[in-house]
Image (cartoon, coloured by chain):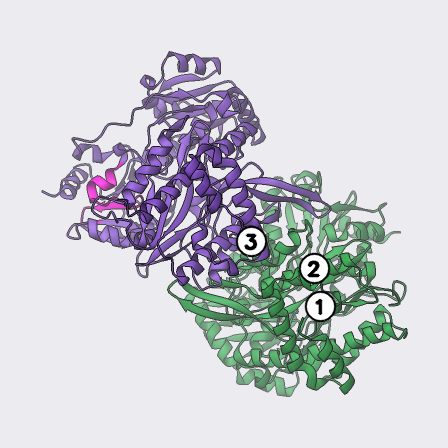
Chain colours: A green, B purple
């Protein structure tokens, strides 16, 4: 019998008419560990987003535009229908349920996995009188060999890396609590907890966090965690900071003890089960977690460290570029995968290296046009003909997290390719040079990068950039560049000095090639005048931009000056990490044009 | 006895503890006729915005940043306290009333003058159990020589000007009603009624509208108006279009007859009295008036006419420039006022001229830095020394409405002034050249104009541009350029081909000079590619930009090309309306640089 049918039997036994399986963990994390891949287990669909609805009659999988083709390939349409979000006549899950459920029906899900706003929206949309059963994880019953919850040991991030003591962060947070007239703060976002406590671990691939919940009041701080993850040193450290430790599994029972509190909580982050328990007897003040902004505005130590690691990290990208160009010119064996391995190995040898910040993207020719391409042995292209190799990569280090894309030309790059490369460069430079009044967000500034590409009636179907964590998620809200607001991203915050954001415009021509150039930029003060407080960006990524692919005539005087100045700085910052040969080569590839 | 004290006696007699006098007419118009200037009558303050609150204890006038200085000068602080909106420790009117009013107190106002959202906000904020008395216009009682309601005769805008028949507009509007699942539409915005009916009048200075209300259902259309304003021809025309006429004063009684309707209404526009009457027995669907977008997207006839009138209108501005420069050079007598009169006279002689579209701004030297300067005989500067003369002016014609600013240099313009003039020009050109994906609004595009000025750590404290009506309000929502949303402006609509928007960046140096260059731009399709639907702007204002004030070295190749092409077009479009002498002069002032 098919898995879905077995599951449907369990639903029937539990009296459930429809059951929702979202793509999430208990913490609304961007990436989830294997334990939480229930949707993938039941549907076969491996994408990073998607919501499965199983009813007693059929099953439905809602996916967004990135995944229309992949979902149709991976899912058996005898059992599951693909619901293409945003296309004509495709109802939302709320609309579907409104139509499907009748008075007295039961809707089921695991409340710990459900976004609070989604559940509220379902409740508001469905007009029938239904019952919600949010207590059980029904998937468990049909998944005997389910992976266990992730386990990794927790370590402390030293003050020379974190820059601010945990107890000072907690003091500031308590002041925020008071400012919002609340007396309890419930934090479930894993990056925020790790940042607050200056602790890291390895529970989620490429995201150095640990499953946990955190509760703060005026007099109490409690960390809910699998106690086996902390050794005696960490135990002592937590105690020293006035933080009690309770078991991860006791969190929901503990929540039930609160009554009459004014609770600060971020309903974009906290799951429905937390909300429904607390909302019963307390007042919820729904605001962005204060930790989100505190952690986005890097402190002086974090900034100093990040700038330093970017020099060493950028040097590895220069080494890769040297390797790619020389291998091609010498007809040596090189492929997408071997290029990725080359840079991954270089990074892993650096002092203070912790992990890659994401799986390296290495896409040659038409593979470069797929924004989320990941080379497999089957798809792996040899790099043995002229074209663009796009490499998007980064590392987590004790000194911070990096994210950089360079597009390398090998062999003869034709005129159209050079034109497009230069347009992307113009876009990247134009945003790098922005000067703006305090109060601007990414929607105000996005056109600086997108404008030169729009001028050619082209576009890239993603944001222009995202915030970057410090040895935390490489995609970090609330700052970002995007021309239209995307509610679930929450990345339209006003820029503040200390925020780090990527700047990564691109041109992607299906079946042809992709070009992306990505630097990270630190927001800095520019000056205060009678007209207001002005800000700008300081580029903190240091690696050459391939001069072989540039049409100098298309650059303005100012753009040329920016590029020359940038390349001069790149040479100065990274040459000491290179071999003599690489250094000589870099001199040429950072020359004035 | 002071007026405020007399008024307070009346309040006391009516049992009213606090009375609100906003700046408004019954239609939430941008400009109001004299009859409605109650706030000015009672407070002495002549600004275009401000809300007066008279309590049994004192009186308070809320004004925004534009008017802090003026209000303090004009208002007697023995009786009225100025409440500076947005400054520290200044409560909003809602917060003030929450603090001031106790259980059982009565709050009074004329519901016809009050914005519905403001009243709702007051009701939500004030925690005491108060009573609202919204029936009477108490000001009437203390204003014996009050001006009468405006009276002007209504005329029909011929189809060769309007481009679309009234009955076709009504058919489209009925389709909108149905689309929104509503069966009644109540329209109170005067520009929208005039547009819908292809009628115009002269009830409000520089705004060719007439006081009226309009109600539409599937089978009925009713215009509420002072019947003396329509002659037999208009009467017949309305009948022909299936529109009943009722008296303006019978509107509110008529509203009480509706019961159980689903009513489409724009609560940003409809006043509180309308809302409270209808909300009692009907369901209100609060949406932007569909007429707002319909009227903003100009039809082919309106576009053709507007382009034509802009040639003739721009020629008058060129004549003015010739006159200013020659008068100065020949030491002839010329002043801010005489320059304004010169262009006003030129416009008024044009065929199809109806009115100025606003009072001409003519500001020399430091007067140019005051954004809303209006020369008086006392302030009038002679134009007899080197400097900038900023002239912002426009006309209402049967062929459309114009709004144009040019800044003319007389005598030797120094280096700093030329630099700043050139920066403003770069800003204006940069926005003129925008190419963008459909979906963009003014917040996405504003930085194209503001960026070059922000680069110099300067700013202008207003939007970059506004929509323009067709023989209607010169400031027309919902399109505009502005980097931060201003709720009450509602001018952040997505751009659509057919919208006309001004592009008017500027630099204003207090006590020194002001520079503004303003063109109108028509939104046009740019092309559809695999990446989406692209739009751009076509400049439709034709008058020379003073080459005496430009530093050519600061312009990029593309900016120079834009300016040369623009000036070539200006000459071609307007030279036939000039004298031989002016034509020769224009040839020089539109030369290639």
The answer to whether dots 2 and 1 both sit on one chain is yes
The residue that disc 1 covers is A405
Tell me the crowding category of disc 1: few under 14, some 14 to 19, or many 20 or more residues within 10 angstroms, Cα based: many
Q: Nearer the viewer, residue A470 or B241?
A: B241
Callout 1: SS: strand
What is the number of the mark on residue B559?
3
Residue A516 visible at all: yes
Res B375 quadrant in image = top left
Q: Is residue B138 above or below residue B486?
A: above
Callout 3: SS: helix
Left or right: A385 in relation to B374? right
Chain of the residue under the numbered disc 1 shown in the image: A
> Where is residue B76 drawn, in percent x and y?
17, 50
Q: Residue at x 75, y 59 (%)?
A: A371
> Where is residue A499 drawn, in percent x and y?
55, 69
The residue that disc 2 covers is A506
Q: Residue at x 23, y 41 (%)?
A: B40
Which-is-in-front pick, marks 2 and 3?
Answer: 3
Q: Is residue A472 magenta?
A: no
| Count of numbered circles on the image | 3
Res A469 quadrant in image = bottom right
Q: Which residues are magenta?
A: B37-59
Q: Nearer the viewer, residue A191 or B205?
A: B205
Q: Is residue A562 above or below residue A370?
A: below
């Amino acid at each position: 019998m098919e898995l879905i049918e077995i599951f449907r039997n369990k639903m029937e036994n539990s009296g459930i008419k429809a059951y929702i399986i979202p793509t999430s963990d208990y913490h609304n994390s961007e990436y989830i560990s294997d334990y939480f891949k229930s949707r993938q287990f039941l549907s076969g669909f491996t994408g990073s987003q998607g919501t499965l609805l199983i009813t007693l009659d059929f099953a439905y999988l809602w996916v967004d535009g990135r995944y229309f083709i992949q979902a149709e390939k991976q899912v058996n349409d005898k059992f599951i229908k693909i619901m293409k979000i945003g296309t004509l006549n495709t109802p939302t899950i709320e609309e579907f349920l409104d139509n499907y459920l009748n008075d007295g029906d039961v809707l089921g899900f695991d409340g710990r996995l459900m976004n609070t706003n989604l559940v509220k929206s379902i409740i508001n949309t469905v007009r029938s009188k239904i019952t919600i059963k949010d207590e059980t994880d029904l998937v468990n019953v049909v998944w005997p060999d389910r992976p266990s919850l992730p386990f990794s040991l927790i370590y402390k991030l030293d003050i020379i890396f974190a820059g601010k003591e945990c107890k000072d962060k907690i003091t500031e947070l308590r002041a925020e609590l008071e400012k919002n007239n609340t007396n309890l703060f419930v934090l479930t976002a894993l990056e925020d907890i790790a940042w607050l406590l200056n602790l890291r671990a390895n529970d989620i691939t490429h995201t150095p966090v640990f499953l946990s919940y955190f509760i703060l009041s005026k007099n109490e701080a409690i960390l809910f965690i699998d106690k086996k993850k902390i050794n005696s040193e960490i135990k002592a450290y937590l105690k020293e900071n006035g933080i009690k430790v309770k078991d991860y599994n006791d969190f929901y029972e503990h929540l039930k003890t609160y009554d009459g509190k004014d609770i600060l909580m971020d309903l974009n982050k906290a799951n429905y089960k937390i909300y429904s328990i607390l909302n019963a007897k307390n007042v919820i003040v729904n605001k962005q977690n204060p930790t989100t902004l505190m952690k986005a505005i890097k402190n002086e130590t974090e900034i100093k460290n990040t700038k330093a690691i970017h020099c060493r990290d950028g040097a590895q990208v220069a080494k890769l570029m040297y390797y790619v160009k020389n291998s091609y010119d010498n007809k040596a064996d090189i492929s997408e995968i071997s290029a990725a391995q080359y840079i991954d190995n270089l990074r892993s040898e650096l002092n203070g290296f912790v992990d890659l910040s994401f799986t390296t993207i290495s896409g040659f020719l038409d593979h470069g046009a797929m924004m989320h391409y990941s080379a497999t042995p089957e798809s792996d292209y040899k790099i043995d003909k002229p074209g663009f190799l796009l490499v998007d990569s980064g590392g987590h280090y004790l000194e911070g997290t990096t994210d950089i894309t360079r597009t390398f030309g090998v062999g003869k790059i034709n005129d159209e390719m050079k034109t497009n490369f230069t347009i992307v460069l113009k876009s990247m430079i134009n945003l790098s040079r922005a000067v703006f009044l305090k109060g601007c967000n990414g929607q105000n500034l996005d056109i600086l990068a997108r404008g030169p590409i729009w001028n050619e009636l082209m576009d890239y179907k993603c944001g222009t950039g995202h915030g970057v964590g410090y040895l935390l998620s490489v995609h970090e809200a609330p700052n970002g560049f995007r021309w239209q607001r995307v509610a679930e991203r929450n990345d339209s915050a006003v820029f503040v000095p200390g925020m780090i954001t990527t700047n990564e415009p691109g041109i992607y021509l299906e079946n042809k090639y992709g070009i992306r150039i990505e630097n990270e930029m630190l927001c800095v003060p520019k000056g205060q005048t009678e007209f207001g407080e002005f800000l700008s960006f300081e580029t903190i990524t240091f690696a050459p931009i391939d001069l072989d692919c540039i049409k100098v005539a298309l650059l303005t005087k100012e753009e040329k000056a920016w590029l020359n100045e940038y390349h001069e700085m790149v040479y100065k910052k990274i040459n000491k990490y290179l071999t003599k040969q690489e250094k000589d080569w870099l001199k040429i590839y950072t020359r004035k044009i």
